[in-house]
Image (tube, rainbow, N blue to C red):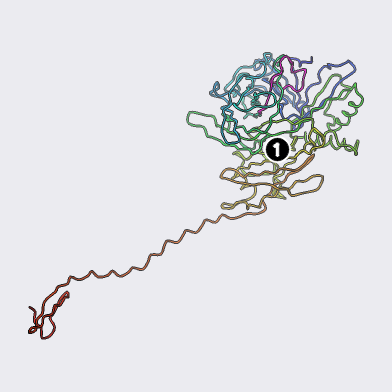
């Protein structure tokens, strides 16, 4: 059994990859292993730990603070720190960031509130730290397990709800945190030490026997809604692994200083790669030598004793490493499908990453408010955020993923959802007041191997967001470009003319009052009726 030492050192290459330290080999003295993985279902830096940070060359080095803030090297007033923790439930947290509720939304729209079941993982006593409200740091908290009445998966009915929060502290000032929120169908394997099985999802390096959770499979995608209470209202962009995302913000009340952020979306299948190579097996050793060329000097050579694994995040230079590995494999054997073009597994997950200050490159529009949300089932992407190309007027998003599902035959079809705040979209695409995109205005171009192809896409808009969806494209490398090529002007309808007033009809004079008189002439009698009756000539009024 291989267990990490108490004082683990993690090196994070700036803008590049996460490299764990070389650990003593658990194999024969003359054998070492090298590994690489892309796992959207796992955090590269899990746990409840305070790290001190310093820059060494081109890398940022993190050292665990054994006594938390009491460690002389981890004084918040004078050190640069990274605090990793998990969000508690708001039932027990009334001041700092927390999870307010988790809900499953059934296909008929019925909402089923999640029921808290238990915590997941073990406390890491060696790295305990104290609550510090001034720095927005909660006490060490473990993630939760929920159940939803009527919702099951291949291995049971438990779902791990993991809200991992990372807060940077510099000179006694805490920056707004990054939060990774993940919902996974899970089951517990009794008696299995997480260090003995890489499929265990751990909460801490202290997780021990009987706390191994593995990921189950959903028979069909599930739609979840999560509400968070956050001290800092998210700005910039969010990213995720959900279908048809929805986001709402509720401003703090007079007594509540926290913004309620409600995130909704449907889970999706994301490909993963998790490979290990042994120096004791010539074929595997040769494969790693091919893979390692993509890392340049940023990987451990076989001459370095011990084992090393490179858990790569989905963004930043990770995409170039993946693309380089696929290219290297093609060069080594042009007649066979690159092994990295075939996924190792598909994981059903629901994930949203909140980067409160996330910004898209190339845009000078006001970024003081929330700008948008981008989601894809691609394994890796060039940047978590789209890049705006001023020359083409497009929001570009470069993504990569294995071309095939784990069976090596079925193509993996991509999906891309983009939610852009209305005000921000108007600025980016220069939409004046009263202008909206025409129904056929959205163009989504996918560029693969130098060829460009316009693919079908959907667009909708409301008072808050422009929504774009593209799906059905294939990998391994793709570049999506979204552009609004036409506009329609919203013309306020002319006020309906007031109904014409009909010409006044002369009023009929009131009928005059009539009088009847009797007129006689000899023996002849006549009656005359009129307003002013007069007897005819020769007649006299009787």
Q: Which residue is mark 1?
A: 376
- Above or below — where is 382 with respect to 288? below
> Could you tell me which quadrant the C terminus lies in?
bottom left
Which image quarter holds the N terminus?
Answer: top right
Q: Quadrant of residue 331?
A: top right
**Residue 484 vs residue 349, the one in the foreground:** 349
Q: Residue at x 52, y 56 (%)?
A: 492
What percent of the width, then of the height, locates residue 432? Answer: 59, 52
Residue 271 vertical position relative to residue 7 in the rendered view, above or below: below
Q: Residue 490 colored magenta?
A: no
Please tell me which residue lies in front, 128 or 497: 497
Front residue of 372/202: it is 202
Q: With respect to residue 26, does 220 lie above or below?
A: below
Q: Residue at coordinates 58% horizontally, 33% vertically from top-left?
A: 262
**x then y, percent, for residue 466:** 62, 45
- Please provide percent x and percent y for residue 207: 70, 16
Quadrant of residue 161 in the image? Answer: top right
Query: In which image quadrant can residue 406 be found?
Result: top right
Please say whether residue 311 is visible from this viewpoint: yes
**Is residue 32 placed above or below 236 in the rendered structure?**
above
Q: Which residues are magenta?
A: 182-206
């Amino acid at each position: 059994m291989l267990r990490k030492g108490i004082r683990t050192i993690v090196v994070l290459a700036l803008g590049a990859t996460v490299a764990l330290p070389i650990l003593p080999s658990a194999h024969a003295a003359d054998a070492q292993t090298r590994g690489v993985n892309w796992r959207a279902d796992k955090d590269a830096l899990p746990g409840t730990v305070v790290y001190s940070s310093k820059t060494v060359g081109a890398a940022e080095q993190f050292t665990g603070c054994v006594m938390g803030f009491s460690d002389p090297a981890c004084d918040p007033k004078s050190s640069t720190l990274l605090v990793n923790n998990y969000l508690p439930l708001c039932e027990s947290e009334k001041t700092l960031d927390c999870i307010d509720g988790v809900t499953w939304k059934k296909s008929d729209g019925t909402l089923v509130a999640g029921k808290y079941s238990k915590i997941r993982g073990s406390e890491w006593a060696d790295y305990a730290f104290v609550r510090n409200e001034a720095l927005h740091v909660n006490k060490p908290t473990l993630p939760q397990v929920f159940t939803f009445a009527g919702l099951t998966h291949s291995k049971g009915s438990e779902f791990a709800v993991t809200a991992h929060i990372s807060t940077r502290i510099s000179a006694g000032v805490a920056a707004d945190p990054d939060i990774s929120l993940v919902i996974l169908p899970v089951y517990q394997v009794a008696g299995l030490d997480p260090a003995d099985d890489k499929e265990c999802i751990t909460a801490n390096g202290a997780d021990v026997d009987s706390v191994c959770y593995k990921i189950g499979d959903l028979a069909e995608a599930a739609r979840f809604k999560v509400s968070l209470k956050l001290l800092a209202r998210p700005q910039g962009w969010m990213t995720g692994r959900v279908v048809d995302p929805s986001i709402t913000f509720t401003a703090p009340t007079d007594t509540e200083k926290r913004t309620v952020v409600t995130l909704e979306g449907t889970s999706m299948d994301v490909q993963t790669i998790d490979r290990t190579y042994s120096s004791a097996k010539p074929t595997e050793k040769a494969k790693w030598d091919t893979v390692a060329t993509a890392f340049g000097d940023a990987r451990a050579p076989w001459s370095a004793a011990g084992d090393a694994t490179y858990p790569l995040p989905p963004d930043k230079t990770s995409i170039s490493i993946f693309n380089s590995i696929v290219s290297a494999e093609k060069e080594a054997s042009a007649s066979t499908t690159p092994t990295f073009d075939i996924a190792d597994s598909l994981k059903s997950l629901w994930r949203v990453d909140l980067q409160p200050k996330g910004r898209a490159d190339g845009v000078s529009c006001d970024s003081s408010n929330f700008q948008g949300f981008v989601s894809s089932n691609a394994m890796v992407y060039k940047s978590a955020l789209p890049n705006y190309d001023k020359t083409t007027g497009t929001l570009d998003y470069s993504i990569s993923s294995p071309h095939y599902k784990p069976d090596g035959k079925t193509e993996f079809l991509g999906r891309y959802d983009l939610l852009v705040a209305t005000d921000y979209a108007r600025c980016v695409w220069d939409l004046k007041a009263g202008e909206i995109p025409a129904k056929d205005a959205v163009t989504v171009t996918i560029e693969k191997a130098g060829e460009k192809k316009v693919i079908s896409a959907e667009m909708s808009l409301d008072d808050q967001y422009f929504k774009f969806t593209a799906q059905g494209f294939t990998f391994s490398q793709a570049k999506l470009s979204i552009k609004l090529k036409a506009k329609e002007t919203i013309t306020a309808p002319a006020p309906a003319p007031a109904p014409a007033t009909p010409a006044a009809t002369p009023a009929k004079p009131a009928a005059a009052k009539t009088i009847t008189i009797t007129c006689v002439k000899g023996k002849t009698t006549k009656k005359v009726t009129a307003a002013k009756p007069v007897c005819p000539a020769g007649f006299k009024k009787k």
